[in-house]
Image: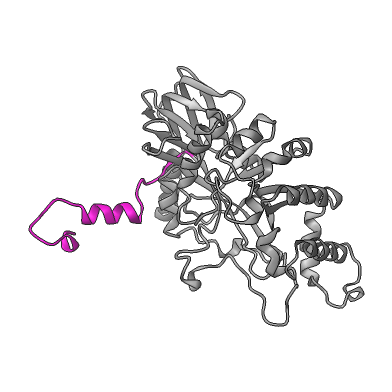
Amino acid sequence: MKRLLLIACLLSSSAFAQNVLIKNATVHTAGLRGTLKNTDVLVQGGIIRAIGPNLSAPGVTTVDAKGKPLTPGLFAGLNDIGLEEVSAEKTTVDSTFTLGEGAQGQMRPEFDVVPAFNPNSVLIPITRIEGFTFTALSANPGSSLLGGQGAIMRLNGKFDDPIGSRILYANMGSGADELSGSSRAAQYMLLDQAIREAHGLSPYAYSQALLTPAGREALNKYLLGGRTVFHVERASDIRQVLGFAKKNGMRPIIVGGSEAWQVAAQLKADNVIVLVDAFQNLPSTFDQIGSRLDNAALLQKAGVRVGLYRNDDPSQNARKMRQGAGLAVSNGLPWEAGLAAITSIPADAFGVGDKVGRIEVGLVADLVLWNGDPLEVNTFAEQVWMGGQAMPMKSRQTELRDRYMSEENGMPRAYSK
């Protein structure tokens, strides 16, 4: 009997923690309603139940936002958060499958990184206290054009299942030359063979099979409308990918897109979402000759739905996504579009826009209260809620700071606590 009472108390406490009324906020919905001033948001059972002025909910914890910005939880990009701890230490990295000798050219699209996700990774609270609540787990190319599968994970530190369906990752362009006999033309030849195998053509029709039986089954799902990330930069490569995806029934997401502004009309016509790196202003490869800081602004102006990602050390520095949004805005992207680029548009791109990425009734209450403009680098998150539950606003970094920067107590800093 005592045990049942204890369980009931724990469940009651958990449910109460997921109820909150945030009053007097400047609510940036990242949706059709835009920005709502002096607005309240009611969360019950971890779900947004009402948005509007003068809401009341007796018995529910109330937070006075005092006019400060309230946004949806931000998108942390495509990275290995939860799949790595220290990128230079291979034993802590689980995002790449490298084929053994004698398996050159083989593809393993059935490789799925999700089972390796660690919700207790120290990178998660480091990222979350900066306002980021969901991320796209990436399967890195390794030794295959098809790196494998990932998914969208919420950064709540719980052993939850992914939200949405799996995502296939394909690496194209000069960055994949070593995986395709040093020619991007061969990339389409190899992918075409893989697709033929997935459709049931005997692999023995070729001198070497590219897919295992499990690989054929996995790839076939993406030929029936599954979402596939194509990491590609050059305008001509983007055009080829769009044609290839349409021919094979794939739903492409363009990531990289340094020259995407040059093919904006086709991207709009095909209703393809592009995720660009707002920091990319100078070419670092010959695929990026057309790089420019107003890439996102030009795409948005042309009617393309554009989101953001971070190419440089995306796991350890996911927090720079917010800085990237501010940079895109400073180069012509409208402010509301800048916020959408790290909230609702990535959520839509990966098929989870009905769950996260906006402040709308019925969506999961992943919310962030800021002390100022969330796209300014000197702004910080005052409180993050996930599923209506207030997250601890601390990480390993803040704990180290507090330990070593404490007041003098007559002992060396290392021994202060």
Q: Residue at x 72, y 37 (%)?
A: 264
Residue 354 appears in the picture as rendered: no
Residue 1 in the image: above or below residue 89: above
* Image quadrant in which you'd find residue 184: bottom right
Please give the name of the residue rendered at 60% of the width and 29% of the height, measured from the top-left corner.
Answer: 31
Percent of width and height locating residue 2:
39, 54
On whether residue 415 falls in the magenta region, the answer is yes
Q: Residue furthest left?
A: 410
Q: Which quadrant would the C terminus be assigned to in this image?
A: bottom left
Q: Where is residue 371 shown, x and y percent of the image? A: 36, 32
Where residue 383 appears, x then y in whole percent? 39, 38
Question: Is 405 situated left or right of 352 in this image?
Answer: left
Give the side of residue 201 with respect to residue 189, left or right. right
Q: How is the image coloured?
A: one colour
The span picked out in magenta is 388-417
Q: Residue at x 36, y 24 (%)?
A: 66
The picture places residue 49, in percent across and down from the top left corner, at 54, 29
Q: Is residue 206 visible?
A: yes
Viewer-closest of 264 and 87? 264
- The quadrant where residue 287 appears: bottom right
Is the residue 202 above or below the residue 82 in the image? below
Closer-to-camera residue (378/47):
378
Q: Residue furthest top?
A: 54
Q: Which quadrant of the figure has residue 316?
A: bottom left
Any magenta on residue 132? Answer: no
Q: Is residue 390 left or right of residue 399?
A: right
Q: How many marks?
A: 0
Q: Is residue 68 left or right of residue 313?
A: left
